[in-house]
Amino acid sequence: MKLEVALSLALVGDLSFEGALADHPTREWLSAVAPCFRGADLAIGNLESPLLESGERIPGKCTLRGSTEWANVLREAGLGLVTLANNHTMDYGVNGLRSTTEALERAGIQYVGAGLDLTTACAPAFVDVRGIRVACLGRTFVPVSAPIRAGRGTPGVAFLDQEETMESLRRCRREADLVVLLLHWGLEEYRYPSPDQRRLARDLVRAGANAIVGHHPHVIQGIERIGPSIVAYSLGNFLFSDFEWEYRQNGVPVKTTSRLSEENRRGLVLEVTWSAASGFSLHPRPTRIDAKQGAQLDVSSTRKEEIDALSAGLDRLRYRHWWYLYALRREWSLRLGPKLSPRQVLKKAHKLRPRHLHKMLVSLRRSTKIVSERSTNPYE
């Protein structure tokens, strides 16, 4: 490898096709951003939806899906590799996983982070470009109660076991020039990573990760440099839409709609240039999801300022103490306030039953565990 040879990457966050996008896989949804992918040596994203035409959903969770034809649309747009290590790849069980990997293989897209057994799920993908060998690993650190983890002889996704992942990073470091870890982690709707996440990032960098590319919060978080390495804590949603889903409450089916907020519509293409001599150069290109036109580049000046501010926020003194206060405010805004505000309590006081008090206590306990960093799952 020549020290002065430069490699370009285009990195994006969550790609999901549930809702209006599921069975309408057309190139127009990505045409505005495709030049970013095609102009890079390698474009990488997180495929958040299994690809299949129909199937049986696993019970007990929100499920996502997209047509297998989406694999061809992604490849035509220029995407070369995706991670499947997330909390939705197994939404349609083993059949959904098989359909997804087969569709990606037919389209010529490499994938990491899932497979028919633990060894396959944890295996890296190697890409050779311009005489530079890139190793990509996919892991998820998002806990769900459904059986989605790969095991010995068990299909599933690669869950982050810190000891195993660090050993894999060390091995990749010996075999490749550049090591990229695609990591599904963090708290949904949080703009700042937890102190534990930042500590984990440092451990993973020490083990050999040159770049950690994060997703799952569905909003953008900051970018941090740790020595010569970079950590993009969350790239936000790149392509997503509103969708309806159904769950059971006390045995009764309940339909609900998940709608994208303005923050959920904001993502970015993180354009990265790397060489052994100069290290990383970063060029974030903000994007916005348009309900009718798909992913669009967003040239408004405030978006660049937003990304810079989120990154600068990681340099706060006593970040851990600041984050606890931030998490308290966030939990009140997301989960507790809508249920416990004086207006809501007075409005529904005559309908309150013991089961409602129990639900409030459960919500309070969940939020307390999140703020104290004992949990990252607001649903269990």
Image (cartoon, grey):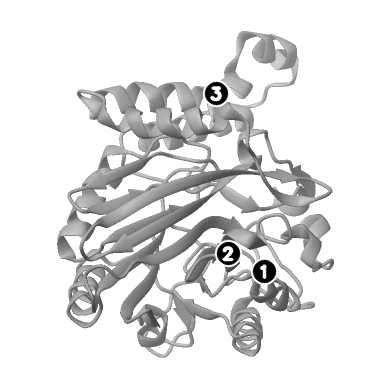
- In the image, what residue occupies the spot 73% across and 69% down? 66
- In the image, what residue occupies the spot 63% across and 61% down? 35
Instruction: Please tell me which of labels 2 and 3 falls first in the chain.
Output: 2
Q: In this figure, which residue is indicated by the disc labeled 3?
A: 333
Task: Name the kind of residue labelled 2 in the image.
Answer: Phe
Q: Nearer the viewer, mark 2 or mark 3?
A: 2
Q: Position of residue 165 (x, y in %)?
A: 26, 70
Query: Observer-nearest residue: 7 or 247?
Result: 7
Q: Is residue 72 above or below residue 275?
A: below
Give SS at disc 1.
Answer: helix
Q: In this figure, which residue is indicated by the disc labeled 1?
A: 77
Q: Position of residue 340 (x, y in %)?
A: 58, 18
Q: Is residue 327 above or below residue 183?
A: above
Label 3 packing within 10 angstroms: few (<14), some (14-19), many (20+): few
Instruction: Please tell me which of labels 1 and 3 falls first in the chain.
Output: 1
Q: Position of residue 245 (x, y in %)?
A: 75, 53
Q: In this figure, which residue is indicated by the disc labeled 2?
A: 37
Mark 2 to mark 3: distance in Å?
36 Å
Locate residue 76: give its quadrant.
bottom right
- Left or right: where 375 falls relative to 90: left
Q: Are dots 1 and 2 in contact, CB under 8 Å? A: yes
Task: Name the kind of residue labelled 1 in the image.
Answer: Ala
- In the image, what residue occupies the spot 24% across and 52% down? 200
- The dot on residue 123 is none
Mark 1 to mark 3: distance in Å?
38 Å
Evaluate whether residue 26 shows in this view. Answer: yes
Evaluate whether residue 251 shows in this view. Answer: no
